[in-house]
Amino acid sequence: MTLSRNAISPVDAVLERQDLWRKRLAREARQERRTYEDGPYPDSSRVVAAKSLLKMLGLFARGVYNASNPLLHTRVLSFDALPSAFDGFRILHLSDFHFDVGFDVFEWTCALLDDIAVDLCVLTGDYRFNQGASCRAVYAGLQRILSVIQSRHGVVGILGNNDVGAMVEPLRAMGVRMLVNEGFALDRDGAAIWVAGVDDPHDYRTSSIPAALGGAPDGAFTVLLAHSPELIERADGCGVDLYLCGHTHGGQVCLPGIGPLFLNTRCERRYCAGTWRFGKMQGFTTTGLGASTLPVRYNCSPEAAIIELRVQNSSQASECYTF
């Protein structure tokens, strides 16, 4: 397959990355995204009222329980363009941890991932609970999770809309290969795929797929990491094969017969949870591991996901296992 990337030169890719990075940092400065290092993120009056209502209805404790019991799903996706050397390649996809000193997710995540071996682990952003929450909680929780991950080709990550640029270097120091509108070739048995990651397309709007794909050989099988599903149409136009994202939490609060009340994303609902197709591209939007605003979930379980890649075989596609 020949990719239509609207390709830019390596020099232009570097310049675009730098320009978008300055844009992100400038927006962070304008919004004065402070962090609360010594305690949990302070609740707004609306959050306090919502908690009080849920407690009065006897639903709050159940919501916290739901948010504290993640599932591990395996989904098998088949592709014509996948090199045979990557048949059976397993990607552990983790997203939306929302670490906070008042609601820790790392212990039950560690238990869920214990003894799970994969070929690559990808993190698709939102490590902080909310936009002003503690970075200290992020580093402590993520370090614990990284200690149990068994990934042959390491861990790759991107930033989300709740994260700040200052987190990139600490995460790299932990061993996470952070991608900010950039990518790299991953080799296996003489073949390669291209793994690309873009900056947040939701709040910051500082993503660049052409920059992230800069340097990828024409026809390379491409995996794109984006925080939200809002770049689907653009990614398909650039020839991306597999799109992995989170951000939506699957709604976090879903009503029977109605579904999610709020998805906080600019795309159709059918792309906001689970596996999907758009044009020639396949994708997966995880419901994520954590919860934000309120530490509760209803009819929408938190999850970690293993994406198993297969050379095209209709009997393998779209299988799902729950553990």
Image (tube, rainbow, N blue to C red):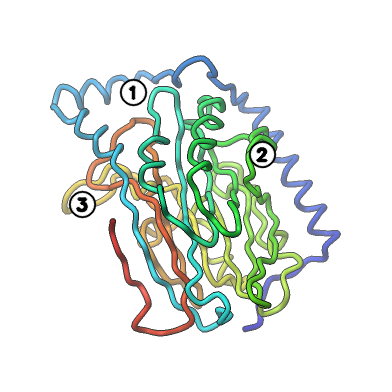
Eye-nearest disc, 2 or 1 = 2
Please report the residue visible at 63 percent of the width from the left and 49 percent of the height from the top.
199
Distance in Å between CA atoms under marks 2 and 3: 38 Å
Rendered position, 107 above or below 43: below
The mark found on residue 168 in the picture is: 2
| Residue at the front extreme, as displayed | 115
Asked if the residue under mark 1 is in contact with the one under mark 2, i.e. CB atoms within 8 Å, the reply is no
Q: Which residue is mark 1?
A: 46
Few, some or many C-alpha atoms within 10 Å of disc 3 (few <14, some 14-19, many ≥20)? few
Give the amino acid type for the residue marked by disc 3 in the picture.
Answer: Ile
| Residue at the left extreme, as displayed | 57
Q: Tell me the element at label 1.
A: helix
Asked which quadrant contains residue 72, the reply is bottom left
Asked if the residue under mark 3 is in contact with the one under mark 2, i.e. CB atoms within 8 Å, the reply is no
Eye-nearest disc, 2 or 3 = 2
Q: Which residue is mark 3?
A: 258
Rendered position, 317 above or below 72: below
Give the amino acid type for the residue marked by disc 2 in the picture.
Answer: Val
Position of 62 compared to 285: left or right? Answer: left
Q: Tell me the element at label 2.
A: helix
Q: Earlier in the sequence, mark 1 or mark 3?
A: 1
Position of 2 compared to 9: left or right? Answer: left
Please report the residue visible at 67 percent of the width from the left and 32 percent of the height from the top.
166
Q: Position of residue 237 (x, y in %)?
A: 59, 72
Give the amino acid type for the residue marked by disc 1 in the picture.
Answer: Arg
Quadrant showing the N terminus: bottom right
